[in-house]
Image (spheres, rainbow, N blue to C red):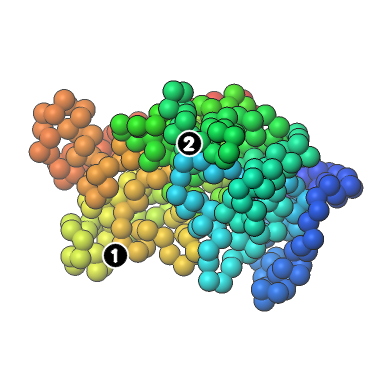
Amino acid sequence: MDNQNNQAYEKALNRLNEIERLPNKIDNKNDIKDILENNGISRRDFMKWAAAMTATLALPSSFIPLTARAAELAGRLPVVWLHMAECTGCSESLLRSDAPSIDSLIFDYISLEYHETVMAASGWQAEQNAHNAMKKYKGDYILMVEGGIPSGQSEFYLTIGAHGQTGAQNAREAAEGAKVIFAIGTCSSFGGVQAANPNPTNAMPLSKVTKKPVINVPGCPPSEKNIVGSVLHFILFGTRPSLDAYNRPTWAYGHRIHDLCERRGHFDAGEFVQSFGDEGAENGYCLYKVGCKGPYTFNNCSRLGFNQHTSWPIRAGHGCIGCSEPNFWDTMSPFEEPLANKLYATSFNGIGADKTADTVGVVLLSATAIGIAAHAAISAVTKNKE
Ligand code: SF4
């Protein structure tokens, strides 16, 4: 291990020891060993998962035992999960699987003090639970917020519970007592579909509603690895990870989908699907010309896939729609047309709007290169501030 990794290792080890030493404030009756065993997952499988998660977090392999320990300690940290204006897809993607993955079991094990989708309470009792948890664990809990937040004069569009509290008020109040705050999903990170033009409820991302720092974990939905990995990273280090210009952890959002895409060889060879269902599609060619936004999208889907590596949109035959980028509903649509067509039309004030990706390839590549360079520069500045 080099010096930097050595220091990080020591820091993580000390932190895990400290979490273990402190009296456990959580009334969590679950035991992760039992949960795994009851679901037919052996210790060996768990350690393999820890190795994969360590690599996902961009940590050296010496951290594998620490990652496993962090997962075992995940039940000691209280989590408050709020729902704003959204479809609950971020929670559902993690919770609703036939055969639960280790990520979803860890998520079950995490002490979710308040989560509207999974808790038994409803109505008054649910509201009371939220207030009790925020009071009891003030300054200690992890806050995760899903959904865009109607704000300003339109705040009332999201009114929750009998007291007429708005979602924005709830989010602000919960953020006040939180130790660390994650915006889960694109709606909470950037406003999402609620904030798409014409944004009738003036929906905002969480970071515009609270003054406290927010770590964005976007995606529609984000992968379970990025959600669970965010919690584990916090348990390991107790600080914010290195972030990019949009406050996304660079361990998850540091590379473009395009960089590691399994169809990349076809892009480089100029082999494209021209229309859905054609021979190119049968041959697994690149989906750029049928709208793939992988060259402009930062996320780790091409490395991790979804549903325990089963598949992901590009493998299934549809291009990336850029769902982890800000304002993607407006900027990346139409989803089944190359972005270069739109870039060309808008960049030149409509002149040449009839041009296609074929004729503007050079413009696209230059724009992409400039975009990537700017992103890298801003990310570097952000990183240095950490
Ligand atoms: S354009 Fe899309 S499908 Fe083609 S290589 Fe890039 S990410 Fe993959």
Q: Which disc, if any, is residue 284? A: 1
Q: Amino acid at mark 2?
A: Leu
Question: Is residue 370 left or right of 216 when viewed as pictured?
Answer: left
Residue 252 at what x, y percent from top left? 54, 46
Which residue, given by chain and number where applicable, does mark 2 sit on? 158
* Nearer to me, 95 or 287: 95
Say whether residue 111 is left or right of residue 228: right
Residue 157 on image: x %, y %: 44, 34
Query: Residue 157 versus residue 278: which sits nearer the camera?
Result: 157
Rounded to the nearest angstrom, the CA distance separating label 2 from label 1 is: 44 Å
Disc 1 secondary structure class: loop
Q: Relative to 136, does residue 373 appear above or below in the rendering?
A: above
As helix, strand or loop, the secondary structure at mark 2 comes to loop
- Whichever of labels 2 and 1 marks the residue nearer the N terminus, that label is 2
Residue drawn at the location 64% of the way across and 30% of the way down: 173
Q: Is residue 262 above or below residue 140?
A: below
Residue count near mark 2 (Cα–Cα under 10 Å), binned few <14, some 14–19, many ≥20: some
Q: Nearer the viewer, mark 2 or mark 1?
A: 2
The x, y position of residue 171, in whole percent, is: 58, 34
